Amino acid sequence: MGIHVPSHVPMESTPFKGMEFEADEIAYGFYNEYGRNAGFSIRKEYVNKCKKTGVVTSRRFVCAKEGVRGKDKRDQNVKNPRAETRCGCEARLVIVLNRDSKKYVVSEFIAEHNHYLHLPSTVHMMPSQRKVDATHAIEIDLAHESGLRLKQSQELFLLHNYC
């Protein structure tokens, strides 16, 4: 399949080694936005925390297609198994806490993917991009508490957004 490198992402939106972030969640948001622009979904792979304080000391964000699915002991019982989505992609962003500056610094960034990237018209369907903002979440809760069925609340939501 070859190596695929996002080429249409502006330089100011591309992570680089040595880049600093005030918090690990800000780094996640930045890498997720980079992934959206580039055409891939991300996930949090691991986190290391200080045992005394619970502060995140390092974290790795990876392409959602990183690794391979582990063997499931229920395989023989599954009637319609899900398609394999992982292909061993090595694209990732690793951040480490600088204890002096109290900022998270990018220690590793791999931009190359071993799979095709998504088209801009389909990125909203990728797992890390499917987010409900706070306003919509409140509207969904209100519709549910009012006794509206899911289809009715979706119609109300669509009507509200088009008016």
Image (cartoon, rainbow, N blue to C red):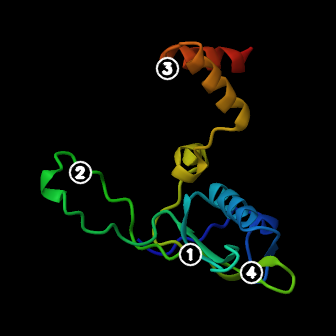
Mark 3–mark 1 distance (CA, rounded to whole Å) = 41 Å
Q: Quadrant of the C terminus?
A: top right
Q: Secondary structure at mark 3?
A: helix
Q: Nearer the viewer, residue 70 or 41?
A: 70
Q: Position of residue 138 (x, y in %)?
A: 68, 28
| Label 4 sits on residue | 97
Q: Between tags 2 and 1, which lies in front?
A: 2
Sequence-wise, the earlier of marks 2 and 3 is 2
Name which residue type carries label 4: Leu
Name which residue type carries label 3: Leu
Crowd class of label 4 (few under 14; some 14 to 19; many from 20; radius 10 Å):
many
Q: Which mark is residue 95?
A: none
Mark 4–mark 3 distance (CA, rounded to whole Å) = 43 Å
Mark 2–mark 1 distance (CA, rounded to whole Å) = 29 Å
Quadrant position of residue 112:
bottom right
Q: Quadrant of the N terminus?
A: bottom left
Whether pointer 4 and pointer 3 mark residues with C-beta atoms closer than 8 Å, the reply is: no
Name which residue type carries label 2: Pro
Mark 4–mark 2 distance (CA, rounded to whole Å) = 40 Å
Q: Secondary structure at mark 4?
A: strand
| Label 3 sits on residue | 150
Whether pointer 4 and pointer 2 mark residues with C-beta atoms closer than 8 Å, the reply is: no
Quadrant position of residue 12:
bottom right
**Measured along the vertical axis of the image, is residue 19 above or below residue 79?**
below
Q: Position of residue 152 (x, y in %)?
A: 53, 13
Sequence-wise, the earlier of marks 1 and 4 is 4
Name which residue type carries label 1: Glu
